[in-house]
Image (tube, helix red, strand yellow):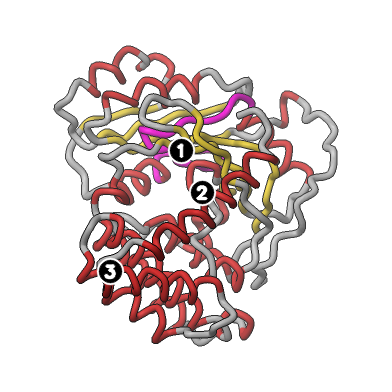
Amino acid sequence: MRAHTAPGTTVPTASPIPAGALPLVSVVTPSFNQAAFLEGTILSVLQQDYPKIEYLIMDGGSSDGSPEIIHRYADRLAYWRSEPDQGQADAVNRGFAKASGAILAWLNSDDTYAAGAVRAVVEAFAAQPEVDAVYGDCVYVDQAGRPVTVFRAQPFDLAGFLCTEGYIHQPTVFLRRRVVERVGPLDASLALCLDYEYWLRMATACRWLYLPRSLARFRMHPAAKSAARRREFLGERLRCLDRLFADPALPAEALVVRNQAYAVANLSGGIQSYEAGNFREARGRLLAALRWDSNPFHLRTLKAVLLLFDVLTGLRVGKRLVDLHLRGLRRRWRATEETP
């Protein structure tokens, strides 16, 4: 079956699952030198109110005290190791290969699960057996763990997903084992967009379900990979799009947004370069965004033009207007937030 539209946002109320029928949920945490945040991640898994969790930690040979932290919880882990690997995707793939759960997830060592997240996901899967993957809303927190905002996801639609910054936040995603059996492991050649590429690969082979509640907390901090390696991030994102649009079986509704997808990716890269003070790189990315899609009725076109005006003139008028728009969006998000 080739399906890419999730079956709505409403999860039917499920009858309590008999204790003997509870599926095992396997959670893998890949980690490397994240001692500052690792214990919080571990506790967020171990303190879930769901009784059948198999927890595996794949540490890449950390030298910052992470192994000592893991060892304190060793008797509550199904498996852990601390040895060199080939990166995050390799660590997750190795963890999934050792896991025995019917439901799989990975949680990075600087993120945490919300209380009750695993139980809510299991109930959602039980209510809709045809669903392959569940995801939800994500609370953004600062380096100290203080909530900044709640990012609201939306029901999955491939064409819409391609024309946004992406609304599937990795720490909120849970997969049935059949997903990995169907689409294969994560691409270990990717360091930053391994999750984005996997969602795209799943898009035409799996059914997604959006669960409208906060499932995880995503930590924003200077050492985060996507923040520290913006140029590499954009390069990987463009590679993922190249691979997707080369698929002859891609649905027509996705093909028609090809230009917009590349425009959004380049605009995002341009904004990041601008904010980092690399105006030459920003100019190139913003011009690329306009070459891909210069539709004057798209808000992203206006953003690109405003930022290009700044880059070419040395003024900051365009950036201030873009920031005003973003602040308005954040106010609307906060107006609808639940307590994190």
Q: Nearer the viewer, residue 316 or 129?
A: 316
In the shown orientation, is residue 264 left or right of residue 288? right
**Callout 2 amino acid:** His
Residue 28 position, x and y percent, is 42, 37
Which of labels 3 and 1 is toward the front? 3
**Callout 3 amino acid:** Ala
* Secondary structure category for the residue under label 2: loop
Please name the residue that numbered disc 1 is placed on: 218
- Of the numbered discs 2 and 3, the one sitting upstream in the chain is 2
Q: Which residues are magenta?
A: 97-116
Residue 251 position, x and y percent, is 61, 81
Q: Nearer the viewer, residue 226 or 292?
A: 292
Give the tally of numbered discs. Answer: 3
* Secondary structure category for the residue under label 1: strand
Residue 322 position, x and y percent, is 46, 60
Residue 169's disc number = 2
Mark 1 near mark 2, Cβ–Cβ under 8 Å? yes
User: Quadrant of residue 318 in the image?
Assistant: bottom left
Please name the residue that numbered disc 3 is placed on: 282
Q: Residue placed at 49% from the left, 55% from the top?
A: 180
User: Quadrant of residue 279 in the image?
Assistant: bottom left
Q: Residue placed at 53% from the left, 18% from the top?
A: 47
Q: Is residue 167 above or below residue 73?
A: below
